[in-house]
Amino acid sequence: MNTLLQDVRYALRILRKSPAFTAVAILTLALGIGANTAIFSFIDGLFLRSLPVKDPQQLVVFSWTAHARPKLNGHGNYGDCSTQGIRGDCSFSLPFFKTVRAQSSGFSSIAAFAGPLDYDFSGNGPASIAQGQYVSGDFFSTLGVNTVVGRPLGMSDDSPSALPAIVLSYAYWQRAFDGSRSVAGRTVRLNNTPAVIVGVAEPHFTSLTPGNPVDFFMPFSIADRVRSEHWGDGDRTSDPSVWWAVIVGRLKPAVSLVQAQAAATTMFFNETTHGATPILNEADAPAVKLLPAAQGLNGQSMDIAPIFFLLMFAVSLILLIACANVAGLLLARSATRQKEMGLRLALGASRARIVRQLLTESVLLSLIGGALGILLSIWGINAITALFSSGLGAFPFVIGPDWRVLLFTFGIAFAVGILFGLAPALRGSRIDLTPSLKETSSSLHGSIGRWFRLRNALVIAQVAFSIVLLIGAGLLVRTMRNLRNSNPGFDTRNVLLFGINPTAAGYTDRKTERLYNDLQQRFAALPGVISVSYSQNALLSQNTSGDDLHLDGAPPTQSIGTDTLAVGLNFFSTMRIPLLAGRAFNSADFAATAVTTAAEKAAEDAARKPSVPSSSPSSATSATAASFAHVPPVPVIINQTFARTYFPKQDPLGKHIGDTQEEDWSKGSIRDPGYIVIGIAGDTKYARPHSDVGPMMFMPLVGNSAHFELRTAGNPLALVKLVHGIVSAVDDNLPLFDIRTQTEQIAQSLFLDRLMSRLSSFFGVLALVLACIGLYGLLSYEVARRTRELGIRMALGAQQRGLLRLVVGQGIILVLIGAAIGIGGAIGITRFMSALLYGINADDPSTFVGVAILLTIVALAACYIPARRAMRVDPMVALRHE
């Protein structure tokens, strides 16, 4: 320990004697380590941090797999886990959850939850939209989550006879109720249903799924009374073919994961293949898989994971560039310390002692750089979080340095110190004593050639890494430009969007239809409004709906898929989507759709819940068929891609399309009214600007929530206050949400792409700057080392132009070699970015050539200053004896 302290004190004195070198090395390392610490903090917060519950390592989540798609009456997935398409996710029915809870002996406790969903929350000021999650009565006890006010929900609350009760999240309590402790016992209204607040959850518990924050929790028992607009037609509380709940459980200490999984699979297999209504066959091999909850419940983290994995790769290259840069500086500096090392060896120091001293200096440099890097990382974390919040609202993850991040920073700083200090340390311990102790300048540099070639290799490596980063950034920047310039198929200028949810306020379909007509007329009368319409989803809002259809004349088992969008009157003229054939919707189409929708709901209710339990299936079928006897098909407008894909070389107008998504209520004896094509619209992008245009079908909107579109002559945001006033005058229990312009909507949908483009560009430029600093340092050292040679050349008549070519040529050769290596590496690496690109190939030649030219130009600037210094060498001074 005494020897180590002596080495540290000596290292501090050496670093203090070279303040310029020390400052450059520490700042370079701080940038590299700080960038890695910041991005690792996000990786830690997204993927490594434990769930905010008691003993999270004991918690498992249920997921299912099957070889075929189950025949379900309803399916809900709220982003709790990554899905496997139609053949696996973590959604189950409530009857299956109750079966597992009652029969499984491998768990000490089991709970379920579903959501969050949007609900009209009133009773505490103006009505607003809040995120509510259904939970089982044992949810809080299973997770070990307590309350700071009142009590948590219990099994007594999850009873149909219990009064509706809810527990607020801590953040929503602070935001909506100002943290008032008198909130317990207060009555509020959820979708026009009264409920009592019984408690407030602990501050650290926002939800079980990371990135899915919840405003309040409510028991499953009130699901039939507090229904969401996304509810669907199935009975979610008792129908085994409606899957929407996530099941979590705690294993008993004596039960292995394999044993519990086998028992759960047996129950799942029996229910899905031999239950009252089988929804899978034995050959489909339905099974349950138990995953650690922290691994299975990945939530929104999977949406932004590609960004941070890409950035982690980028900052790793930044760190390698920084290491190569500092290693080059130390190699250059070691040449000036040959006499010192030779003297220490002559006085009896061992080579191992010299290596340890030099490594101590490099590790000390790295640790100081790491400490400064932590400060830079805190700034970087705040900056990146602010960028996310500016586009996505409040960032739903807790990001900040913890013990894992600090351990990562210390480990990487120590490893980096060894990495960049090893070559200079070995160089310093392997010198020839006789020439190193001489006083002449030439002797000091007599054995530098091999190590100078290593410095060349370090500069080449920096250039190669920079090329890879710059090419990746260039591809992302061009992707962003392509997305911004892509044609969505409609006019995005001067359109105000906002959502209204009458279903949450207790409106029926008929009342909702009248409400929309009234609001449409009132909005159209506002000054500056050109046209008004509405649709179930706003275009390019990342929300979509779809349907499975059957074309007349096709085999019964053959279905086609299409996107669907329910729209209001004047939708196509408001959004300026061209009609290529046929006509737009009129009032008669909406009236006919309302009749058909009502008949479909009545027929489904009659088939699923016959009034006479002993009635035969044939009598139920007859009654259902009679209700469809005079129901007209729903008029629809298809887009050009739909017509080209499913009606090639024929006129789609007047064609009938069947609906195969609804359950076959009477085992094939009832023909659904289906749809009839009345028009063909131009292609338009639906969910995101990235998406390719696919088959799409528009239909009249009857009931449900809607997003209004107001096309204006001027700034759309100037009408927001007037719109609020109109809606409040009609019904002050109708909250508005998602208020923005269409251009803001598009900007939000492109936010992650824009963020990735900006961050990758920043790190690319940082890599370029570090590489150029390394190139500048190499050439500056070379000029200083060859001062005597340059003086002789000038004394013999060499021109300044020749010296300029000599110095700059050496730098450009290194740049060209590094660029060639970097381009070769980028060709292989950028292939993994293909999924992130739009309108450009991963091996786009113009991007590769453009980056190479940019790097060459910047490198010329870095070479010029040392070259100018070489041109100004005074031959008389250079030829003097030291």
Image: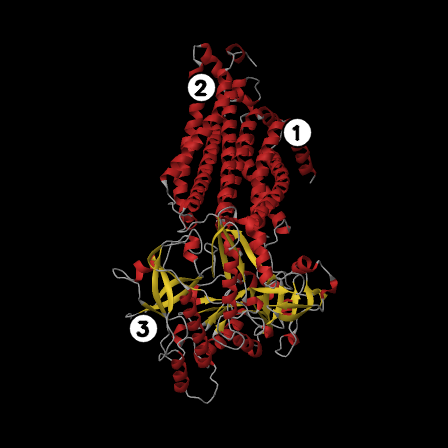
Q: Residue at x 47, y 13 (%)?
A: 792
Relative to 729, residue 858 above or below? above
Relative to 490, residue 53 above or below? below
Distance, label 2 to label 3, CA atoms, is 80 Å
Distance, label 2 to label 1, CA atoms, is 34 Å
Q: Which residue is mark 3?
A: 556
Q: Quadrant of residue 675?
A: bottom left
Task: Identify the amino acid type marked 3.
Answer: Pro
The quadrant of the image that shows the C terminus is top right
Q: Residue 547 location, x and y as percent?
A: 40, 66
Q: Identify which residue, 882 or 28, lies in the foreground.
A: 28
Q: Identify which residue, 872 or 338, lies in the foreground.
A: 872
| Mark 2, secondary structure of its residue | helix
Say whether residue 210 is visible: no
Q: Residue at x 69, y 58 (%)?
A: 174
Distance, label 3 to label 1, CA atoms, is 84 Å
Q: What label sits on residue 16 in the rendered view?
A: 1
Q: Residue 7 location, x and y as percent?
A: 66, 35
| Mark 3, secondary structure of its residue | loop
Say whether residue 51 is visible: yes
**399 relative to 775 in the view: left or right:** right
Marked residue nearer the N-terminal end (3 or 1) = 1
Q: What label sits on residue 345 in the rendered view?
A: none
Q: What label sits on residue 804 in the rendered view?
A: 2
What's the coloring here?
secondary structure
Task: Identify the amino acid type marked 2.
Answer: Leu
Marked residue nearer the N-terminal end (2 or 3) = 3
The quadrant of the image that shows the N terminus is top right
Neighbourhood count class around disc 2 (C-alpha, 10 Å): few under 14, some 14–19, many 20 upward: some
Q: Identify which residue, 102 or 817, lies in the foreground.
A: 102
Marked residue nearer the N-terminal end (2 or 1) = 1
